[in-house]
Each structure stands twice: as structure tokens, then as C-alpha cells.
Image: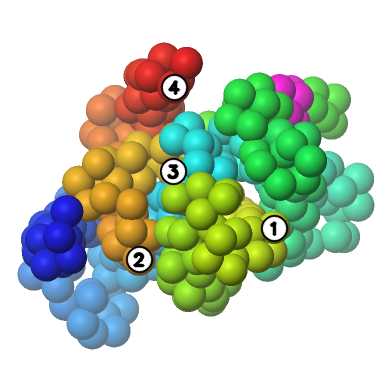
Amino acid sequence: MSKQKKKSKAFILMILGIALLVGGLVISISLGAKNIDFNTILSSIFSDGNTIDSKIIRDARIPRALAAALVGGFLAVSGAIMQGITRNPIAEPSVMGITQGATFMIAIALVLQRINPNLVIGSFSRMIFAFLGASISGLFVYFISSRAGRKVDPVKLALAGTAMGTLLISLAMGTSMYFNLSQELSFWIAGGLTSTKWQGVNLLLIVGGIGLVGAMIMAPKITILSLGEEVAIGLGQRTNLVRFISLMLVIVLTGASVSVAGNIVFVGLIVPQIIRGIIGADYKYIISLSMLFGAVLLVYSDILARIINPPYETPIGSLTALLGVPIFIYLVRKES
């Protein structure tokens, strides 16, 4: 694909993604248990009204919509980075056990809070726990699946990630049952945005923003690494360092996402695969477009989660798994 044609496709996709995202955000903010007219919604966005409707829009619906966009984008970027550095089309945070590691440490945080009621674990502390769990799980799976510390074996990656993810989710569920925290933890395991507040959105913007900037800086190096180990070394790339920095960025983005939205799976598998199939293997475009269309996917998944079985909400993680599992099976069979 020529450079000019690639730019044209990227531009068209960018316009389409922005239009879909804006439309999804408008629908998400308009949707809720209480019917609020569109004029009230607009006035609540652009002014500081003190009515109950205005407070619902500003303090509940807008943070939820923004969090869905940010979490979806960050998870999609994480998947794109992992697929690039491992050259494995099925690599993504949930397949490598990273999201499950973050969920397990959130379960530990809930236990500590139950044991010591005076201990208050807020959004920032929860994010620290999520980072710790994501780091331990992600690094452990990565090094298990590496051959001589350099080349990642795709089969080992899938097996080690699945085993680690299953173990950590089982431990989280067992711990929650023992300490009578099943109801509190069920949200984190299923994934959702029901309790999202502005504090969580602000943390996503700050921490995830740093991770996203780092991902864009690393994009040219990931592009070279995705061409193969020998090619990257021949072009002077320090492949181990590139992989390690990239994995740290994945941990930052995933940890931030899980601390706000819980264990949402397969977003990082679906979106980068589609973008790569359209645009090619240039990670400057893959990462930026994955951010955009990951946001689109999760915003519309959140909308569907609210309308599929009213007045109850379907866990978003179930919907993304419903989309992701067939794609995962197809990719595994294609690579085998």
C-alpha cells in the first residue's frame, strides 16, 4: 500500500470514527432511567444549572460516557502494542492475564478495607493496586512465554496468559467469598461503568494520557519490531528494551482502565485486528486509530448494556466477550 493511499484511508477512518464517537457520546448522555429532554441536556453541558436533571447529566452521565471512551481506547491501544511487540495476533491484556491481575489486586484492596474499616481506599489507591496486579501478572506471563528472554512464543503466551488469568480470577472470587465480598467484587469481574465519577475520569485522563503519549512515541519502534526480530536488530533496535518499555505502557493503560471499569475483555483483540487489516502494519496509524475505534466500541457497548434488559444493566465485559470470542477462535485456528 502506497504512503499516500495509507494516509487517505487513515483520514477517512479518522473522520468516520470521530462521527461515530460523537454520536455515541450524545446517545450515552441522553440515555438513562430518567427521561431528560435534549434542551436540558445541552444546557447542563454548557452551563452550571442546579436542577436535579442538570446534576444527573453532569455528575453521572457525562463521566460515564467519557470513561467508556477512555477505557475502550486505552484497552485497544494496549492490545495493539502487545500484538506488535510479540508478533502475535491474539495478544491482548485479558489473554495475557493483565486485566485479571489488576482485578485480583482490587479484590485484595477490598479485603484490606473490610479487615480495617478505617482504611479508605479511593480511586487513586485502587489504581495503584491495579497497577501492581497488572505488573506482576503481565511480566510473569511475558517472561514465561519468552525464549531465551528475547523472542516470545505465541503458543506459550496464550497458554501462560490463560492459565494465569484463570488462576487470578479464581483467587479473587475465592477471596471475595471467604470475606463475604462477592457482591462488591462482582462488578470488577464482570466489568461496568455504573459507579464512574469525575475522579475516575480525571485519573484516566492523567495516567492514561501519559501512557498514550508514550505509546505514540514508541510507535515507530514497535512498527520495526513487528517486522521481525532479525530485521529490528539489523536496523539497530534494542529489541529487549523496546519490548520492556512497551509492556510498561500496556500495564499503565490497562491498570488505569481496570481500576475504573473492571475486567473488560477482548477490546484489545477486536479493534487492532480490524484497523491493521484496513491500514497495514504502521503502528503510528494503528495506535491512534485503535484509540479512536476502541472508544467507539466501548461507548456503544455501554449503550447496549443499558438497553438490552431494562431496568437492569448487562455487564459490558459479557458483551465484549460475545464479540471477541469468535474472533479469538478464528485467529487461533488461522495461526495453528
User: Which residue was labeled with disc 4?
Assistant: 335
Estimate how packed mark 1 is, as few (under 14), some (14 to 19) or many (20 or more) residues with alpha carbons within 10 Å: some
- The residue type indicated by label 3 comes to Gly
Q: Quick one: SS at disc 3? A: helix
Which residue occupies 15% across, 60% down? Answer: 2
Q: Would you say residue 215 is visible in this rendering?
A: no
- In 3D space, how far apart are the residues under numbered discs 2 and 1 (Cα atoms)? 20 Å
- Mark earlier in primary sequence (3, 1): 1
- In 3D space, how far apart are the residues under numbered discs 3 and 2 (Cα atoms)? 16 Å
State the residue in front, 144 or 17.
144
Nearest to viewer (mark 3 / mark 1) = 1
Which residue occupies 33% across, 70% down? Answer: 58
Q: Position of residue 52 (x, y in %)?
A: 31, 66
Q: Position of residue 64 (x, y in %)?
A: 38, 57
Nearest to viewer (mark 3 / mark 2) = 2
Q: Position of residue 251 (x, y in %)?
A: 64, 56
User: Which residue was labeled with disc 3?
Assistant: 268
- The residue type indicated by label 1 comes to Asn
Nearest to viewer (mark 4 / mark 3) = 4
Relative to 7, say whether 117 is above or below. Answer: above
User: Which residue was labeled with disc 1?
Assistant: 240
User: Which residue was labeled with disc 2?
Assistant: 284
Q: Quick one: SS at disc 2? A: helix
* Residue 166 colored in magenta in the image: yes
Q: In the image, which residues are magenta?
A: 163-170
State left or right for residue 176 relative to residue 315: right
Which residue occupies 35% across, 46% down? Answer: 272
Which residue occupies 77% across, 45% down? Answer: 149
